[in-house]
Image (spheres, helix red, strand yellow):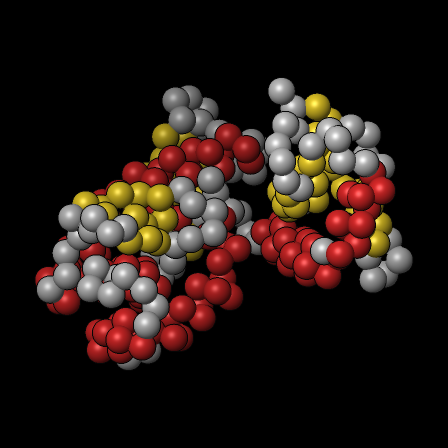
Amino acid sequence: MTRRAALTLTLALPDGGEVPVALIRRARKSIGLAIRDGRIELVAPASVPLARLAEVLDARRDWLLRHWLADAARRAELAALPAAPEWLGQALTPDWTGPGRAACRRDGDRLIVAGPHPERELDAFGALVARWLRREAAATLAERVALWSRATGLAPGRLMLSNARRRWGSCAADGTVRLNWRLVQAPVAVVDYVVVHELCHLEHLNHSTAFWSLVASHLPDWAARRDWLKRHAARLFRYG
């Protein structure tokens, strides 16, 4: 059972403002800190006094401030982004056909939408687009993996979609490769970088010099592709 106390702790900002810290009392042995949904959470056992928790916040102030500001910037970027969905780097213009059963499909550079209005029912529209992107990702990412498996000679034992919030892909020791479904919105070159990256992990399950040499042998410009992903990651999280 989780018990929440009043918000009595804050983190001071460089501009003189303060960020409230949500104190969550939970049956655990350690003190935890996290930034979720735009707020700072401090999870601690009921026996730890507020004075001790304030000391923990002060000791981790620089870390918290850095990550909170980065999270705030990412959320602001997301809020400022246009609503137009993307498919493999191509912006799609929503074309609303009217109310009815929720559905959407791509027709060239248009996304034909039925049901929720793209401007008046943003939450429902976003959920619909996310479901459509997941379906597209299942087929499209499998095609890119198959193509690069032939090119590299490295084939996963199993391919799965991931819903991770911070990782674009992963490779397990048993040969299972997972790719974040949101990648289907990125340009093909960026999708291919993540695909090749994970396939190379089938041979080198690390980030050693040998691993990066193998990646470079297939994608000499891998660093530029990775940089795009770092710069534009927020836009791939507009949906879902």
Viewer-nearest residue: 136 or 149: 149
The residue that appears at 43% across and 33% down in the rendered structure is 128
* Residue 45 against residue 74 in the figure, above or below: above
Above or below residue 96? Residue 40 is: below
Residue at horizontal 20 percent and vertical 55 percent from the top: 145
Q: From this viewpoint, is residue 192 visible?
A: no
Residue at figure coordinates x 38%, y 70% from the top left: 225
Residue 138: give x, y in percent of width and height: 26, 43
Number of numbered tags placed on the structure image: 0
Residue 20: image location, x then y, percent: 80, 42
Quarter of the image that includes the N terminus: top right
50 to 190, vertically: above or below: above
Residue 144: x and y in percent read 21, 56
Q: Position of residue 210 (x, y in %)?
A: 26, 75
- Quick one: which residue is furthest to the right in this view? 16
| Closest to the observer, 101 or 5 | 5
Identity of the residue drawn at 24% across and 65% down: 204
Residue 88 appears in the picture as rendered: yes
Q: Is residue 193 left or right of residue 142?
A: right
